[in-house]
Amino acid sequence: MSGLHINATKSSIYASGSNVSDLLSTDESLGLRAGTLPIRYLGMPLTTKTLTAHDYEPLIDKIRGRMLCWDDTKGSWIWRKLLKLRDVAYSYFRMDMRDGISCHFWLDDWLGKGRLIDITGAVGTLYLGVQRHAKVSEVVSLENWNIRGRRSRRFHELYNAIMAVPPPQPGNGRDVILWRHSDDDYRDNFSCKNTWDQLRVKRPKVDWHRVVWFPQDVPRHSFMTWLAIKNRLSTGDRMRQWGMIQGCKLCGERDETRDHLFFACPFAYSIWEGPARRLLGNGVNPDWQ
Ligand SMILES: [Zn+2]
């Protein structure tokens, strides 16, 4: 239909379920090879079972590597926006350096002092003789730290701080990412809720919050109600500032405002009055306030 064809030499077919043999026999007629799971895709095993955290590790390592090393002039618009948030993200995790294999010497906070590159600037790589993208495990030789700068006065304090830490060893186990749960509390699990609570600006609870957000709400209805309460619906009066002229489609009133639609508009009110009266009794009032 679209004019696209499957390249049979580059494709395999995988099937699961009860009628596997039927499916495979029809598809072998297309010239496709039948493969068996598991295979690896993007470095991860592709199976019919649920992947474990361990299975995701190669992919996460790859993404972490890119987040740390990429400059924000490349990639899509949304990717560049994400990269611009790195400085915010850095303060929410640090590394518990053990074998030093996945831990970046300059770009990860593994010494408890923040990112070393932020302390020294780019010139630090020359002073300490460690490449910008080196892993901590690569800065060791014969089980000792292999850095320059012992006699340099410039980064003496940093040099001593590194020397005071035992160098990474393969037997120590894998490096662990620690996530900030509160100011001084770092743990090895990431909590979305907790991180959001640290990021957001807290304001006092509004008295109408239960009208909008409650258990079993329909999210899109809650969202619309929230917009209405904040008076951010794209009503005619608000669209006018964007150069779009639209009155009330229901009664012809020139100013289509939130208060008009809910429910000063004679047409809207005549429809809603009935159901509202059933729910609320005689206290129904077309005023928004
Ligand atoms: Zn109207």
Image (cartoon, helix red, strand yellow):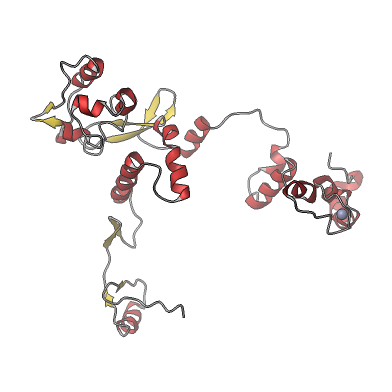
Q: How many marks?
A: 0
**Going 72% across and 49% down the picture, which residue do you hit?**
242
Residue placed most toward the observer, 94 or 76 = 76
Residue placed most toward the observer, 251 or 23 = 251
Locate the C terminus by quadrant. Answer: top right
Residue 214 at x, y percent in the picture? 66, 43
Residue 78 at x, y percent in the picture? 47, 48
Left/right of residue 147 with respect to residue 116 in the rendered view = left
Left/right of residue 237 with respect to residue 91 in the rendered view = right
**Going 20% across and 31% down the picture, which residue do you hit?**
130
Q: Please identify the quarter of the rendering in which residue 14 is found.
A: bottom left
Residue 199 at x, y percent in the picture? 51, 32
**Going 31% across and 85% down the picture, which residue do you hit?**
29
Work out whether 185 lies above or below 223: above
Q: Please identify the quarter of the rendering in which residue 169 is found.
A: top left
**Going 29% across and 82% down the picture, which residue do you hit?**
31
